[in-house]
Image (tube, rainbow, N blue to C red):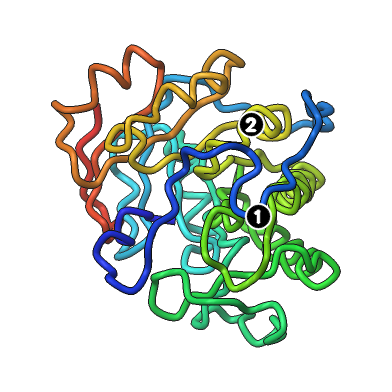
Amino acid sequence: MRRALWLLLPLVLLAACTGSPDGPGGDGDARDTAPPAPSGPHWQPKPGLTWQWQLKGRLDPTVDAQVYDIDAFDQSAAAVADLHRRGRKAICYVSTGAWENWRPDAGRFPKTVLGKGNGWDGEKWLDIRRTDVLEPLIAQRFDLCRAKGFDAVEPDNMDGYNNDTGFPLKAADQLRYNELIARLAHDRHLAVGLKNDLDQIPQLLAHFDFAVNEQCAQYHECDRLTPFVAAGKAVFHVEYELPPARFCAESKKLGLSSMAKKYDLQVWRDPC
């Protein structure tokens, strides 16, 4: 989730990703290490790849970037195939932790799993404890990504337990859900990225193939992503409010794939 806009919404307070793994409500996962995720024939993005993140506007496939992160529903199989012809990899953006009222499958989500708004128009947090309801719905979305030929998925809103969702979510709930999301992607031979959720990187690193982060430089958190780089896994990083001169030197030192974007996530980008 493009979290800095929380600062622009007076009725919503961003919960910073700097607490302990227990998070609000406690009951963190007591395991010191997570079991390794099943390996499979999916893409393994390495540190240093350049990327473009475009979720709005007409897709421009000519940007000089090795990886494109684009919307699951808005982009077609033909668009993905065109990116592949141009030598790009394609990441499928899917919201897995929040409901969006404009999606074609929005009516399949029962009201019982819809929580408070997350600060974006038409979006509400999901009760991620209800995997009996959510697992088949998310699986169908990942099936769509696979059918369109994507190489990976970017599951968004993966840190609900650190926010005011309307549900008493705990760190252990988030770990179980995020591990489920990783398994659903890998079962479809898709790479999967961990979106934000810095507190749980130690437990989730083995399950995820790369990371996507917003504004770690602004919040002085980028060093917390280095376990991904050390494991040979890409970190795709974006800043909205800082110019590249303020973060690129540190990003390069840490091995992050960084760029500046505007909040609307259209074509414009200013990469490191």
Quick check: can you spot residue 166? yes
Distance between the Cα atoms at labels 1 and 2? Answer: 29 Å
Q: Secondary structure at mark 2?
A: loop
117 horizontally vs 167: left or right: left
169 horizontally vs 1: left or right: right
Location of residue 132 in the rendering, given as x and y in whole percent from the top left corner: 86, 69
Classify mark 2: residues with Cα within 10 Å, few (<14), some (14-19) or many (20+): many
Classify mark 1: residues with Cα within 10 Å, few (<14), some (14-19) or many (20+): few
Quick check: can you spot residue 39? no
Residue name at image x 76 percent, y 44 percent: 179
Q: Quadrant of residue 145?
A: bottom right
Location of residue 212 in the rendering, given as x and y in whole percent from the top left corner: 48, 39
Location of residue 103 in the rendering, given as x and y in whole percent from the top left corner: 54, 78
Residue flagged by tag 1: what amino acid is it?
A: Gly
Q: Quadrant of residue 56?
A: bottom left
Which dot, 1 or 2, sits closer to the camera?
Answer: 1
Front residue (pair 244, 115): 115
Location of residue 236 in the rendering, given as x and y in whole percent from the top left corner: 43, 34
8 horizontally vs 102: left or right: left
* Among the two numbered marks 1 and 2 on one chain, the one whose residue lies closer to the N terminus: 1
Residue name at image x 59 percent, y 73 percent: 166
Q: Quadrant of residue 37?
A: top right
Query: What is the quadrant of the C terminus in the image?
Result: top left
Residue name at image x 48 percent, y 60 percent: 71
Residue assigned mark 1 = 25
Looking at the image, residue 100 lies above or below residue 17 = below
Residue flagged by tag 2: what amino acid is it?
A: Asp
Q: Are marks 1 and 2 in contact (CB under 8 Å)?
A: no
**Numbered badge on residue 209:** 2
Query: What is the quadrant of the N terminus in the image?
Result: bottom left
Q: Secondary structure at mark 1?
A: loop
